[in-house]
Image (cartoon, rainbow, N blue to C red):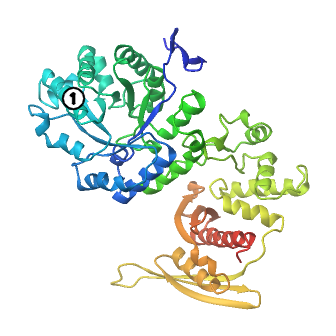
């Protein structure tokens, strides 16, 4: 039934045996991260966060930025006041709200008036296009809903605004009652709406349905208003649905950075934009800005406090990572063998990992990355290093997630890491007395540096924290820059769970010094020793990098 979609010319497609030529080249990107994205569970943007994201989206070249619902809460209301102070160069700030309420005059509805008070050039209003919602949710008549849509659009147009009409639940409504869903769009057009945005609010539509329905809407209304798509990801089709809508005639795509949004999220603009621009030939953002895509994704992830999945297409850290030896060997000869685009086009980079699945090709790539270029591919030293890495991974080490430990291992193998300090001993004391709320951890560390010996002790809120403090205390006079190091993540994983409490553990620690991030790994049957190994590697890595940059 569903044939393969293929482009036969620029903007010309063959779909299910029918050809169609789109009459536009530019696709307008409408970002709703600050409104729909803010509805993500656990996300709470501050006013400052929203303003910073707005600035970043504008710099990237987003066409429309939906700032929120003025009047819905004090933060959104204040946003529209403060955003006017930003020197935006590209984006059009958009206020979001609903049609007037049933059985009210539009000019007396405070919800509508608040949209005008936001003083944005564009306003997006949503209205019901599924008859079920009109009768069961709004508790009004189908005719009254049509009047609500037309009168609200007309009222906003009379005040000189660009009106974007979000036809909520459009695809569900179209499939249940096509005649009424189209009447809702007609009401918006009669009211002067500039855009008809078809919303897959429940996220249940599939790509072939979206194409067919959008195409029908485009053929009926395309000469009266421009068409848009607003897709949710409940069926994991939001990006595909957005692309199919464009092929069906939509020239505006709604979405969020990193696919943030309620439930399973919205269409991910970090995939939509490069797909449209690099693969389908449409203009979305200035070409030179596309290289900032990964930076934008990480920026929003940090402010949302939602870690960016490493395997996220285009912008994830693993999006262009090659682990298998066969893959690495091929991609080093010709990147097209295992990469669908040049990662630099979206601001990402190729990464060759080293693991028990890796071969010499992976390792040679790593050596070049670390500036080691004088090692022969068939040398004994290289074979020894491959064997050593595979043996460590067999013991439970995991270098894919701990590149700093891998770099130290490789450079130590070739004698390129000096002994910044020598370890003598450490001791941990944990005590809890009757009446204590928490146990007290004390660590003692003894290290030697050149002709000096340092013997220090520190208290911590746990044994690893105490060890970290004691080691820094011993080294701080010799290496003041370690004060910049912060531990930002600490993970423990059982390696061989069948051994029960005698199992080995793998400790992964992530660090930052404000300039870079790095991760190290330690493995041992004793969790303290595993933590100590990762901790020491983390500090040595910082010192090694400082020395390479002539900062020591």
For the residue carrying disc 1, how many other residues have a C-alpha within 10 Å: few (<14), some (14-19), or many (20+)? many
Q: Residue furthest left?
A: 103
Q: Nearer the viewer, residue 121 or 208?
A: 121
Quadrant the C terminus occupies? bottom right
Up/down of 446 relative to 262, above or below: below
Q: Nearer the viewer, residue 191 or 38?
A: 191
* Left or right: where 142 falls relative to 467: left
**Residue placed at 63% from the left, 63% from the top?**
520
Rendered image quadrant of residue 367: bottom right
Residue 274 position in % (x across, y down): 56, 36
* Left or right: where 341 falls relative to 75: right
- Residue 392 seen in the current view: yes
Q: Residue furthest top?
A: 17
Residue 457 position in % (x across, y down): 56, 87
**Residue placed at 25% from the left, 52% from the top?**
77
Up/down of 389 relative to 475, above or below: above
Residue 444 position in % (x across, y down): 58, 85
* Left or right: where 178 falls relative to 245: left
Rendered image quadrant of residue 63: top left
Rendered image quadrant of residue 37: top left
- Residue 5 seen in the current view: no
Up/down of 512 relative to 196, above or below: below
Q: Which residue is mark 1?
A: 154
SS under mark 1: helix
Total tally of numbered discs in the picture? 1
């Amino acid at each position: 039934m569903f044939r393969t979609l293929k482009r036969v010319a620029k903007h010309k497609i063959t779909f299910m045996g029918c050809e169609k030529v789109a009459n536009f080249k530019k696709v307008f990107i409408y970002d709703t991260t600050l409104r729909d994205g803010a509805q993500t569970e656990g996300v709470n943007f501050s006013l400052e966060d929203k303003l910073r994201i707005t600035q970043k989206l504008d710099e990237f070249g987003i066409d429309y930025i939906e700032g929120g619902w003025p009047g819905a809460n004090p933060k959104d209301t204040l946003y529209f006041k403060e955003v006017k102070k930003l020197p935006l160069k590209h984006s059009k700030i958009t206020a979001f709200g609903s049609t007037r309420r049933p059985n009210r005059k539009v000019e007396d509805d405070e919800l509508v008036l608040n949209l005008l008070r936001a003083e944005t050039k564009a306003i997006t209003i949503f209205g019901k296009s599924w008859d079920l919602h009109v009768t069961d949710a709004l508790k009004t008549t189908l005719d009254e809903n049509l009047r609500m849509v037309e009168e609200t659009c007309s009222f906003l147009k009379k005040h000189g605004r660009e009106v974007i009409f979000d036809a909520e639940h459009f695809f569900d409504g179209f499939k249940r009652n096509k005649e009424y869903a189209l009447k809702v769009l007609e009401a918006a057009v009669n009211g002067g709406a500039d855009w008809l945005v078809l919303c897959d609010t429940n996220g249940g539509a599939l790509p072939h349905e979206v194409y067919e329905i959008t195409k029908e809407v485009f053929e009926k209304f395309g000469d009266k208003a421009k068409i848009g798509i607003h897709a949710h990801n409940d069926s994991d089709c939001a990006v595909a649905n957005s692309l199919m809508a464009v092929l069906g005639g939509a020239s505006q795509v709604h979405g969020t950075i990193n696919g943030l949004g309620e439930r399973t999220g919205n269409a991910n603009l970090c995939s939509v934009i490069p797909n449209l621009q690099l693969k389908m030939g449409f203009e979305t953002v200035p070409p030179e800005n596309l290289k900032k895509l990964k930076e934008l994704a990480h920026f929003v992830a940090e402010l949302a406090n939602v870690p960016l999945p490493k395997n996220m297409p285009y912008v994830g850290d693993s999006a262009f990572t090659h682990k298998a030896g066969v893959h690495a060997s091929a991609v080093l000869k010709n990147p097209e063998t295992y990469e669908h685009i040049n990662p630099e086009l979206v601001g990402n980079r190729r990464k060759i990992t080293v693991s028990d699945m890796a071969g010499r090709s992976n390792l040679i790539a790593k050596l070049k990355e670390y500036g080691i270029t004088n090692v022969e591919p068939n040398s004994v030293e290289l074979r020894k290093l491959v064997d050593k890495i595979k043996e460590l991974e067999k013991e439970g080490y995991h270098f894919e997630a701990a590149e700093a430990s891998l770099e130290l291992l490789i450079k130590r193998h070739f004698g390129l890491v000096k002994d910044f300090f020598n370890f003598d001993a450490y001791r941990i004391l944990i005590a809890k007395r009757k009446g204590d709320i928490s146990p007290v951890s004390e660590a003692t560390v003894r290290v030697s540096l050149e002709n000096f010996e340092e013997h220090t002790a520190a208290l911590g809120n746990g044994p690893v924290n105490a060890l970290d403090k004691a080691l820094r205390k011993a080294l701080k006079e010799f290496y003041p820059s370690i004060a910049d190091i912060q531990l930002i993540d600490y993970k423990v994983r059982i390696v061989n769970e069948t051994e029960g409490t005698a199992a080995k553990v793998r400790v992964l620690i992530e660090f930052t010094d404000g300039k870079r991030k790095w991760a190290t790994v330690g493995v041992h049957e004793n969790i303290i020793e595993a933590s100590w190994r990762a901790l020491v590697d983390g500090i040595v890595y910082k010192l090694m990098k400082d020395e390479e940059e002539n900062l020591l």
